[in-house]
Amino acid sequence: MEQEIYNQAVANSRAGKYQEAIEDFSRVIEMNPNFAEAYYGRGLAKFDLGNKEEAIADYTQALAINPNYIDAYLGRAIARLIVGDISGTITDANQIITINGNYAPAYKLLGNAYRKQDNQADAIANFKRGAELYLEQKDAVNCRKCLDNIKQLQNVVSPAVKTDSNVRWEKGDSKTFLNRMLRRFEKGDRRGAMADLNWALQVDTSDSQAYCCRGIIRYKQGDNLGAISDFNQALQFNDRDVLAYRNRGMIRSKMGDFKGAIADFDAALKIEPNNSLIYVTRGNAYRDMGAYQEAMKDYEQALKINPNEAKAFYNRGIIYSRLEEMTKAIDDYQNAAQLFGEAEDWNNYQKTLENLKKIQTTVPSQNQNIDEDAKYKKLEQQLLRMVGGYWEMAERLIAKVEEKYPGRDRIWYLEKVISDWQQQQDS
């Protein structure tokens, strides 16, 4: 009987028969004073009739019965916002986020509450978070509302606050979302990553980061012209997008447009003059067009900015090998291999070793030592990962094997420790 009356109350409320719904919910509460959903439903009906204070009282009663009732918190927060209880709204919205940190309506509500307090920075931060969550949920309507609120706030805040807000938007969770799309692509979900980016651009056709991200994916897919189109769009909306300049320059260089490529790298360096990777990519363009001297200057500048820039060593090694300065090439490849190994960049590490092998017959004695050093470094990194980064533990394991099997070389000991450790973990 109780459930039947409750269902009837819900139906009346949905049909706009709010007074009848309130009477039915009240009957249910008389039968069962601990029916939290009945208090919540009666609160909704009272709210729709304009009785905000009475609605708040019912939501509060529902929460006394069920302290984790998100819908009741949301209903009370909205009612409090309307009656001017901003601090109460913020408290309720934060309580929702404590229960569920990915509940988008709570962030949207916080944005509106902080907006009423003229707290533009926190309003923008919460609208931004809400937009990202709605974006992930493919709720285009509410995502657009959050984005529109952000733009409205950015148009009215003072220059100092506006600058801070733009930094939050450009470097915050939207960038995290786009990086996640790139990771999805790298893991093989290419269609899903592109679909989400296309959807994001439907929501906001001026999102320079989304264009840049899609351009990178198109480039990785071999669609050079499509990628350039996306980077052009990104730069149209943000002419200080260093990533767009750098990637467009790399594609132009690959297509033989060295003049256009170098112009892009020059533009990027005007914005970030201490970016070592841009010097490396410009050096590569000079190298590919045969301007080795200019390329060398860029690699040296990259290493002056970042002495551990592995790609500068690697690409300078290519030039030295072309100039048949094999000793210098080997030195650069050795440095590159060590740095790639330390960074656990095994693709570039392997590529560096392959280049070393190509010049092995030229300087065999040095190359043999380099190969051994590189192999030892790789095994060392593998063992370190296996013991959770505790090198003291790794040293003790090596010492025990050395004591048991004296007279072996250092690589043998590392391989033995790794093999024993893996057998122990599998047993």
Image (tube, helix red, strand yellow):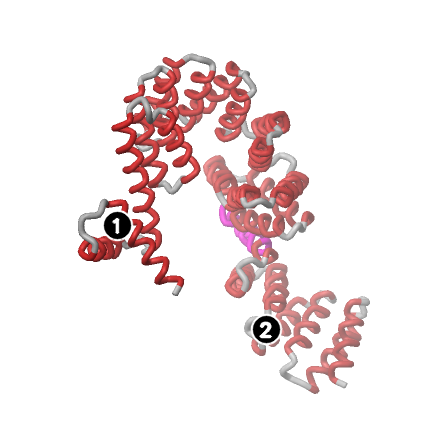
Q: Are marks 1 and 2 in contact (CB under 8 Å)?
A: no
Q: Earlier in the sequence, mark 1 or mark 2?
A: 2
Secondary structure type for disc 2:
helix
> Which one is in front, 224 or 95?
224
CA–CA distance between discs 1 and 2? 68 Å
Determine which residue is flagged by label 2. Answer: 60
Assign the magenta stretch its main secondary structure.
Answer: helix
- Which of the 4 quarters of the picture holds residue 33? bottom right
Residue located 34% across and 34% down the image: 337
Residue 174 visible in the shown view? no
Mark 2 surroundings: few (<14), some (14-19) or many (≥20) residues within 10 A: many
Residue 418 position, x and y percent, is 32, 53
Residue 46, disc: none
Residue located 31% across and 37% down the image: 374
- Amino acid type at image mark 1: Tyr
Q: Nearer the viewer, mark 1 or mark 2?
A: 1
Residue 120 position, x and y percent, is 52, 46
> Which one is in front, 78 or 277?
277
Residue 55 position, x and y percent, is 66, 70
User: Residue 177: within the magenta?
Assistant: no
User: Residue 113: within the magenta?
Assistant: yes
- Amino acid type at image mark 2: Thr
**Screen quadrant of the C terminus:** bottom left
Residue 425 position, x and y percent, is 37, 62
> Which one is in front, 301 or 135?
301
Secondary structure type for disc 1:
helix
Determine which residue is flagged by label 1. Answer: 413
Residue located 33% across and 29% down the image: 333
Q: Which region shows up in magenta?
A: 108-122
Residue 282 visible in the shown view? yes
